[in-house]
Amino acid sequence: MEIVTTKDAWISEFRKDRNYGDGGGYLLNEEPGPPMMFLGFSGRDKKVVLLGFDVSKIGTSKVSRAILRVCCPYSGAHKSCDVDAKPILKPWEELIVTWENQPNLGRSVSTTTLEGTHKTDVWYEWDVTPIVNDMLTGKAYGVALDPQGDYGVDRDIACRESGDGKEARLVITV
């Protein structure tokens, strides 16, 4: 069973009061770009991705396996970056969440290395079984992708607003 994200946002340590829940990226030259999220670091600016899913469709209180799949449409970084999958421990709203009001995150349950490459449409996976089981019992409210490391490892992440079938998804085994 696959469940696509029902809400997603990214938050920026540099722009602490801005909400990026509508698929809007940085508008550096005031030109709208394709909807996307950002993950990683540029300078001292850390960017974290938050993902929410409607797990009521699973129809059980426990799954045997849950894999999070996320598409990176383009990676302009030459460096690799380890990204932790963490449970979101408090409710959050896609069009309200910012760095300043972000929900608490739990400990990492899975780490995946995003390779330094200039390839397009690379899919990355995390085993998020414990997080999904906590979501099913109301102990978690989604998955956060939290990059570890240093500067120069920004990644574009497909968001649900892109409408191209590359939005984040859970692959569930009951």
Image (spheres, grey):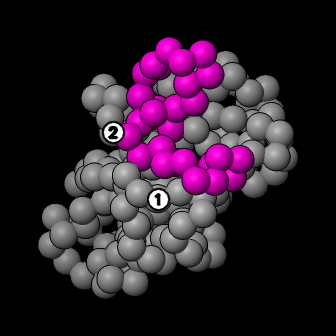
Res. 104 in view: yes
Counting from the top left corner in percent of width and height, residue 148 is at 75, 54
Q: Quadrant of residue 93?
A: bottom left
Task: Look at the image and say whether residue 165 sits in the magenta stretch.
Answer: no
Question: Which is more toward the observer, 94 or 106?
Answer: 94
Mark 1 lies on residue:
97
Q: The residue tagged with tag 1: helix, strand or loop?
A: loop
Judge the density around disc 1: few (<14), some (14-19), many (≥20) Cα neighbours within 10 Å.
many
Counting from the top left corner in percent of width and height, residue 125 is at 51, 48
Q: Which region is colored magenta?
A: 10-37
Judge the density around disc 2: few (<14), some (14-19), many (≥20) Cα neighbours within 10 Å.
many
Counting from the top left corner in percent of width and height, residue 145 is at 57, 55
Give the residue drawn at x 41%, y 57%: 96
Question: Which is more toward the observer, 78 or 14?
Answer: 14
Tell me which amino acid carries mark 1.
Val
Cα separation, mark 2 vs mark 1, equals 16 Å
